[in-house]
Amino acid sequence: MHGLIFLELQKFAQQQAGTQAWNTLLREAKLPVKSYSAVRTYPDEEAFALVGAASRVLNLPAGAVLEAFGEFLAVELIQLYARLLQPEWKTLDVIENTEKLIHAAVRVGNPGAKPPVLECIRTTEDELQIM
């Protein structure tokens, strides 16, 4: 998992439960206290362990934690990659163009990064199929 996701998860945890929340999650996930780098990749298992820990600490189902984190992360990523987006784009337009614009930029800027490959087909104005 890309290190940027871990950094954003840390910010999300602190927003939800205070400045010490990240250390609490690391402890609950049985992970060592460490700093994640935005330009490195880390085992997916660490992200899964942190989401499980957040579920327990926040007393929410893991799905609810992921949904709330997704909403938080979307805002952060749109701000980070705003220069690549067209102001008139709506949500489906952003998703449709993520692979060729954002993921391509991530791969160029960080050759070790492995964002998922998003193959999208716009089926109608209001529908997008992701494969």
Image (cartoon, rainbow, N blue to C red):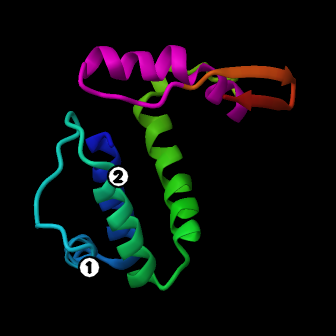
Residue type at numbered disc 2:
Glu
Whether residue 110 sits left or right of residue 103 in the image: it is left
Identify which amino acid the numbered label 1 is placed on.
Answer: Glu
Magenta stretch encompasses residue 113 = yes
In this view, 67 is above or below 18: above
What is the number of the mark on residue 8?
A: 2
Q: Earlier in the sequence, mark 1 or mark 2?
A: 2
Give the dominant element type of the magenta stretch: helix, strand or loop: helix
Circle 1 SS class: helix
Q: Quadrant of residue 39?
A: top left
Q: Position of residue 105 (x, y in %)?
A: 38, 17
- Residue 94: where, in percent of width, then height? 62, 27
Task: Please tell me whether mark 2 sits on a helix, a strand or a loop.
Answer: helix
Give left or right: position of 42 versus 11: left
User: For mark 2, does the 10 Å Cα neighbourhood hold few (<14), some (14 to 19), or many (20 or more) residues?
Assistant: some
Q: Position of residue 32 (x, y in %)?
A: 11, 67
Q: How far across and how far down the image is residue 77, in percent?
A: 45, 38
86, 25: nearer the viewer: 25
Q: Quadrant of the N terminus?
A: top left
Tell me if residue 121 comes above or below residue 69 in the rendering: above
* 22 displayed left or right of 126: left
The part of the chain drawn in magenta is 91-117
Per the image, the residue denoted by label 1 is 28
